[in-house]
Amino acid sequence: MTTFLTGATGFLGSYIAAELLSNSKERIALLVRSRTIEEAEKRLWRSLQLHMNFQTYWDHRTQRIDIHLGDLTEPGLGLNKASQERLLESTDSVIHAAASLNRKSEESCANVNVKGSLEVALLAKKIHDLKPLRRYSLVSTVAVSGIRENETVQEDTAIRWNRPDLDPYGRTKKMSEYLSQRVLEGIPLTIFRPSAIIGDTRFPQTTQFDMLRAFAWMAKMSVLPLDPSWRMDIVPADFVGKAVVRIHKSDHPRHPIYHLSAGLASPNYREISDCLTSEFHKRRTHFSPGLCGIFMKSCDWLSNSRLKSGLVRTARLVNVFRPHLLGNTVFDNSRIVEELEERPASFVSYAPGVLRFALDHQFSYPFLPFCQPGTQKEVA
Ligand SMILES: NC(=O)c1ccc[n+]([C@@H]2O[C@H](COP(=O)([O-])OP(=O)(O)OC[C@H]3O[C@@H](n4cnc5c(N)ncnc54)[C@H](OP(=O)(O)O)[C@@H]3O)[C@@H](O)[C@H]2O)c1
C-alpha cells in the first residue's frame, strides 16, 4: 500500500520521505508542485540529496516513488484524472506536511494552510469512503499556541481561540488543525507540532538557513539584548522525521497530538551563546536584557526602512522570529519521549557544526546536479 505525502520538496518533508523510504518497502505517493514529471524529479532530487546518493534516489524513484503533479491551492489539489484515480485506489495513509511558512503573508498562509489543508483532508475523506484510511498525520506547529510568555505549553491546552495569534502562519496552522479534525471525523488522525526545527544531529549539512542566520548574528555580538536565562525550544530535523514516521506507522498511538520539541530540556541563551561563540572567539557574550526594548524598536525602524544593507536583513529576520526569541516558552515533550523512549539531542550538542557548515557555505547548500539516469550527463 501507499502513503500519500505532501511537502516532500521542503526541508522537513524530505526527512519524512527519506524515513518512509528507509523504514519500509512500501510505496510513497508525493504531491509535487511542478509543471512536468521531469521537473518534479529534479526538484525531489534537490530535497532528497541531503539523505541519499543519486543512485539510491533513482532506484527509489523508479521502484517506490509515485509523483503526482499538483498544487494545494487548486480545487482538488489540481490533480489530473489519472492521478486522482491512482490515489483513490492505492492510498492507505496520508501525511500532510506541506505548508506556507511565509509568516508575513496572510494571503499565502490562508491559501496554502487553510484552503490547501481542506483540499488534502477532502481527498483523504474520499479515499476513506472507498476503503478505510489507516492514518492521517498532520504536521502542524507549536506556533498554534499563539503569543506566550514564560510558559511550558501542554498539547491539550495549547490552542485557545480567545488568545492573540503570533502571526498569519500560526493563525492559519491553527485553523488547519481545526478543520482537519472536523472533516476527518472517524479517521485516525494524529497531529504533530514541532518547535523550531534546526539542523541534524548526524551531520552538519542542512538546506534551511533562516534561523541559522539569526544565530550567526547572535554569535558575533559581544552584547545581546536578551535575558540569558530565557529558553528557546529547538529540535533537530532527524528527530522530527523519525517521530512523525514512527507514530504514523504505529497501529495505536497513545495520543492524538504530540509536541515534537525539546521541552523542559531546552537550552537557555547563555548555553546557546556559549556553544556558538566558542566557534568564533574566546570571550563570553555579555547579556543586557534592559536593552531589549530599544533593540526591538531599532529592528522595527530598520525593517520598515528602504535602506539596503545586511543590518536591515538581520533586523527583518529578528522581527520574523521575535516571538520565539522573546517568549521564553517551551513545549512539553513528555508524550513523544515516553512513546519513542528517546529524547531529542540538545541543540547545543550539535549547533556548532551546523553553524560552521552554514558559514563555510554562505548560508546555501552546494546542491549536486541531477544526472541523466543511465549516463553521467548532468541536467541543468
Ligand atoms: N521548519 C520549522 O522550523 C518548522 C517548525 C514547526 C513546524 N513546521 C511544519 O513543518 C512542515 C514543513 O515545513 P518546512 O520547514 O519543511 O517548510 P518548507 O521547507 O518551506 O517546505 C514547505 C513544503 O510545502 C510545499 N508547498 C507549499 N505551498 C504549496 C502548494 N501551494 N502546493 C503544494 N505544495 C506546497 C512546498 O513545495 P515547493 O517546494 O513547491 O515550494 C514544500 O515542499 C510545515 O507544515 C510547517 O508548518 C516547520
Image (spheres, rainbow, N blue to C red):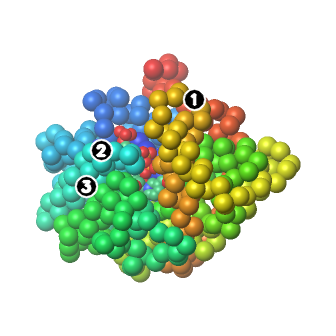
Residue 22: x and y in percent read 50, 54
Q: Work out whether mark 2 precedes mark 3 in sequence or the reverse, and give the earlier one.
A: 2
Q: Residue at x 58, y 56 (%)?
A: 293
Total tally of numbered discs in the picture: 3
Q: Residue at x 73, y 43 (%)?
A: 220
Would you say residue 159 is visible in this rendering? yes
Q: Work out whether mark 3 precedes mark 1 in sequence or the reverse, and give the earlier one.
A: 3
Cα–Cα gap, marks 2 and 1 = 26 Å
Q: Nearer the viewer, mark 2 or mark 1?
A: 1
Residue 11: x and y in percent read 48, 46
Task: Say few, some or many: other residues with alpha carbon within 10 Å of mark 2 (under 14 / 14 to 19 / 20 or more).
Answer: some
Q: Quadrant of residue 312?
A: top right
Q: Are marks 2 and 1 in contact (CB under 8 Å)?
A: no
Q: SS for tag 2?
A: helix
Q: SS for tag 3?
A: helix
Picture layout, residue 215 above or below residue 186: above
- Residue behind mark 2: 108
Cα–Cα gap, marks 2 and 3 = 10 Å
Side of 255 relative to 187 (left or right): right
Side of 364 relative to 348 (left or right): left
- Residue behind mark 1: 309
Amino acid type of disc 3?
A: Val
Q: Nearer the viewer, residue 246 or 227?
A: 227
Cα–Cα gap, marks 3 and 1 = 35 Å
Amino acid type of disc 1?
A: Ser
Q: SS for tag 1?
A: loop
Residue 198: x and y in percent read 57, 52
Quadrant holding the C terminus = top left
Q: Work out whether mark 2 precedes mark 1 in sequence or the reverse, and give the earlier one.
A: 2
